[in-house]
Image (cartoon, rainbow, N blue to C red):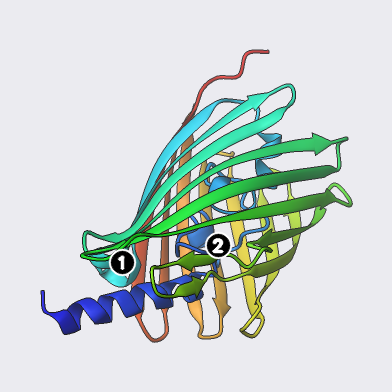
Amino acid sequence: MTKSTLILIVALLSLTLKLHGQSLGYSGPVSSSLAYVKVFDDSHWASLNNVANQAHVKSLSVGAAYQMRFNLSELSSRAATAIVPSRFGSFSGLAMQSGFSKSNYNRYAVAYSRLFGNSISAGFQFNYMNHQMQSADRADAFYSAFGLGFKTTESIKVGVYIQNPEQSKLSYQDEAYALPTFFNGAIKYSIPHKFFAIFELEKELEYDVVYKTAIQFSFNDKLFVRGGVRGKPVEITFGGGFQLVGLSIDVGFSHHQQLGMTSGAGLAYSFKHKQ
């Protein structure tokens, strides 16, 4: 691999952080099929987004996922998650890597979520991230994320999610790279077990607001069809999922108007909850 090619890939990897609107450029196979929404990702992959959604989890679950951004293996992401519910709330862990052997980002996180009554959910996450480049010192950063969800009626929810409010930086030997700080707000309308629609706004401190719209259709809570649009630049997303007993399989695809296709998939298992 030539030096110019390496520089191009690293530049694309940095661009990916902004395109996806999160630190490591990956939000899981469900979110990536739903316009990359974060506030109301109540899938097994909520650890990658708003952990407040994990407050509703009643069964121990584990999962693994993979994504290839713009069909480049150098921009691939891998993640493993675990959610452990208890009578005191839900605890979760996340391990994730994005990039390739010559330049990769690693993220490790632990989180706590719980319900307050029947209408409010809240979650807090502590993250450690590092960036390792070949023949260079490792850069490290710590940051937090927290979110809230409010059930206003049986069909409508509103929520917020904030990532890196401390404005942490990846500290290299000679310089520091600022991690993005994001503020997300969303509203969700749902018909239980059949359909939901989400409208979300995302604001990074140094960039314009990004609008996201997503929908999901559910068939007997076993088969799911998803789609969404986000921009600007415009990115069309689509995908689906299948759930049988405790096993869930999800796929997500997106098409960026300038950079092309992204594809990903995830596999998760929920252990039966004992009443």
Q: According to the image, label 1 marks what residue?
A: 75
| Residue placed furthest toward the front | 174
Instruction: From this view, report whether residue 261 is shown above or below residue 58.
Output: below
Instruction: Judge the density around disc 2: few (<14), some (14-19), many (≥20) Cα neighbours within 10 Å.
Output: many
Instruction: From this view, report whether residue 239 is shown above or below residue 11.
Output: above
Measure how far apart labels 1 and 2 are at the Cα level: 20 Å
Residue type, label 1: Leu
Label 2's element?
A: loop
Label 1's element?
A: helix
Name the residue located 74 percent from the left edge and 25 percent from the top edge: 88
Residue 177 percent coordinates (x, y): 48, 73
Name the residue located 35 percent from the left edge and 82 percent from the top edge: 259
Residue 271 percent coordinates (x, y): 51, 22
226 sits to left or right of 148? left
**Which part of the image, by quadrant, shows the C terminus?**
top right
User: In this view of the protein, which residue sits in the foreground, 145 or 233?
Assistant: 145
Instruction: From this view, report whether residue 142 is shown above or below residue 85.
Output: below
Name the residue located 47 percent from the left edge and 47 percent from the top edge: 241
Which is more N-terminal, label 2 or label 1?
2
Q: Quadrant of residue 116?
A: top right
Residue mark closest to the camera, 1 vs 2? 1
| Residue placed furthest toward the top | 275
Instruction: From this view, report whether residue 267 is shown above or below residue 231.
Output: above
Q: Do the CB atoms of the residues marked 1 and 2 lie less than 8 Å apart?
A: no
Residue type, label 2: Leu
Residue 99 appears in the figure? yes
Q: Could you say which disc has been placed on residue 34 in the image?
A: 2
Marks counted in the figure total 2
Q: Quadrant of residue 132?
A: bottom left
